[in-house]
Image (cartoon, helix red, strand yellow):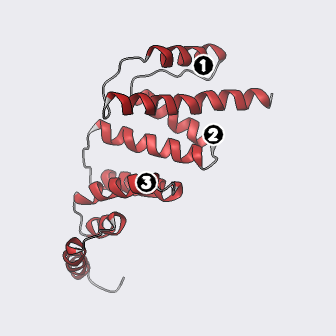
Amino acid sequence: YSSILHSERSGLHERILSVLEKQENKDPSLLAHHYQAVGSVSALDYYSEAAEAAWENKWYAQCMQMVEQAEAFRLQHKIKVAKSTTTRWEYLVAMSLYRAGDLSGGTTRARKCLASLGCSCGSGSKISIFRLKAAQSFRCLIPCLATRCQQEEQICNLRGIMIDYFYHNQDHK
């Protein structure tokens, strides 16, 4: 494969894509790979679709891998995407890390995701946690990610990580 000229490789990937696109049950991760190989922006859509599918199936490592590949492709090609897309990617990674048992990593990504949504989460002090619980109770108003209901659920999940992290660290002190 490495001995084939780049232009020939692109041609091979394009031929593969023409076959894959005709299939009834399309594998979004496979399509993303081939679209990335030809440098098409469509790779981002398929990486996002693959990440969502992995998340739905509880394949957290694959979900994170798809998001990381999408982000790497986006940065490499300097592609601008909607803030809601990058926020959704952050959410998927935060929740995947958390559900895979990486509380610290999940907390770090949850903070980043909450910050991008305009929600302050402080340093993890008791006051910050009480502030998070109060904000959760009053359903702070922030720009929509998807529907209001989905967004509130996502914020509650992210805040749940923060609260779990706080209580976990209190138990070990």
Residue 68 is labelled as: 3
Dot 3 or dot 1: first in sequence order is 3
User: Could you tell whether 144 is left or right of 156 in the image?
Assistant: left
Work out whether residue 154 or residue 4 is closer to the camera in this orientation and state it. 154
Q: Position of residue 171 (x, y in %)?
A: 78, 29
Disc 1: CA contacts within 10 A as few (<14), some (14-19) or many (>=20): some
Image quarter for residue 28? bottom left
- Name the front one of labels 3 and 1: 1
Disc 2: CA contacts within 10 A as few (<14), some (14-19) or many (>=20): some
Dot 2 or dot 3: first in sequence order is 3
Measured along the vertical axis of the image, is residue 24 above or below residue 171? below
Work out whether residue 17 or residue 160 is closer to the camera in this orientation and state it. 160
User: Could you tell whether 147 is left or right of 160 in the image?
Assistant: left
Q: Gap between marks 1 and 2, in whole Å?
A: 16 Å
Q: Helix or strand or loop: what does disc 2 sit on?
A: helix
Measured along the vertical axis of the image, is residue 114 above or below residue 41? above
Q: Quadrant of the C terminus?
A: top right
Identify residue for label 1: 129
Q: Gap between marks 2 and 3, in whole Å?
A: 18 Å
Q: Helix or strand or loop: what does disc 1 sit on?
A: helix
Q: Amino acid at mark 3?
A: Glu
Image quarter for residue 54? bottom left
Q: Residue at x 23, y 59 (%)?
A: 42
Measured along the vertical axis of the image, is residue 33 above or below residue 108? below
Measured along the vertical axis of the image, is residue 42 above or below residue 119? below
Q: Position of residue 5 (x, y in %)?
A: 26, 82
Q: Quadrant of the N terminus?
A: bottom left
Residue 104 is labelled as: 2
Q: Residue at x 45, y 45 (%)?
A: 92
